[in-house]
Amino acid sequence: MTRGYVILGVAVAVLLALPYFGDNYLMRTATFICLYAALALSWNFIGGYVGYPSFATAAFYGLGAYTGALCQRHGVPMPVAWLVATVLVGVFSVMLGYAVLRLRGHYFAIGSFATVELLRLIISSWSSFTGGGDGLNVPIFPGGPEVVGQIFLYIMLAIALMVFAVTIAVDRSRLGFGFRCIHQNEDAADMVGIDTTRYKIIAFGLSAMFCGTIGAVYASWTNYIDPNDTFDVLLSLKVPVMAMLGGTGTVLGPILGAASFVIMEEFIWAQFLEYNRAILGLVIVVLIFFLPGGLLKMPFRRLFSKIGKGEG
């Protein structure tokens, strides 16, 4: 077992034990770290391995949140609602992929970004079904705040670990090799027999369906959603930044980046209430500018190199 796996295992153990010594604030922060780690890992399939700058994260996340919320409001059990959201978002992403993945570079980025706004406008306008701008109340999970906080921390952690396991499997497989070939030179990959269209759609679908799951779980956790929150364009910007902060196209990088981003964000919010967004943005720009390969390229990279490359 590599040292990277040991460090990750210790971190998971701390998260599992957190409800027994941490307060509600720590559990909430830890839950968001798990949530964003899962989102960053999901984005990494299309943005990191394939190299397509997707900004559709909020579209899949919001669609999953509303699908899960609407299912629960119509009496569907919560786990089944999450599964329905995952499948629906996966199917939607495949159909969308056939259209937008024909685009490249800035055109693809703009097309994926437009999807977020399109879905937000549809959800906001369809008030008879989605609640429109007033949002939706989701059935409350039984138990007090501490119980609910503990359960959803474990659920988000489980989802993050599941996406992490899929990432390792993809990284070591022929699929991952195909993704990297497309990233390096898509035309050359097509010439040597790689079905680039199919591979890109698979990456896009993997990225989307996990975002849908996370959105559905988030709706159950918060008990209320609205279009501006779940289809927030900032989410589509923050998640790629997290992956880049840790190291795109790696196994561990998105997790490291998500944890670092959330901790930085919480610290800056607490210390600089009025200028927190400007300071956070400046810090991120400086880090990415001086560490184009992410935090995995820092002097301690040897500690994470094997796990970051997906080696056992």
Image (spheres, helix red, strand yellow):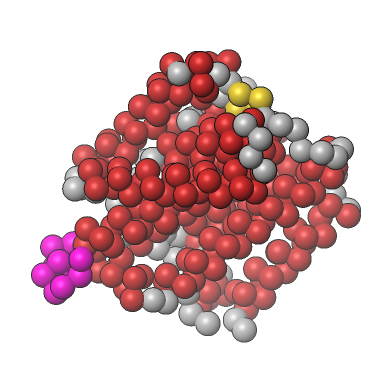
Please tell me whether residue 85 is drawn above or below residue 188 in the rendered image: above
- Give the residue displayed 58% in from the left and 62% down from the top: 162
Q: In this view, does 43 lie to the left or right of 112?
A: right
Left or right: 116 in relation to 166: left
Q: In this view, does 190 lie to the left or right of 11?
A: left
The one of 264 and 229 positioned closer to us in this rendering:
229
Q: Is the magenta stretch mostly helix, strand or loop?
A: helix
Which image quarter is the N terminus in? Answer: bottom right
Which residue lies at the image location 35% right of the left edge and 52% below the top edge?
204
Look at the image and tell me whether residue 284 can be seen. Answer: no
Identify the magenta region: 186-195
In magenta stretch: residue 187: yes
Q: Where is residue 148 in the image (x, y as percent from the top left)?
A: 79, 42
Q: Does the segment drawn in magenta span residue 79?
A: no
Residue shown at the point (45%, 60%) measured from the top left: 247
State the image quarter where residue 9 is shown: bottom right
- The residue at 24%/43% (across/down) is 100
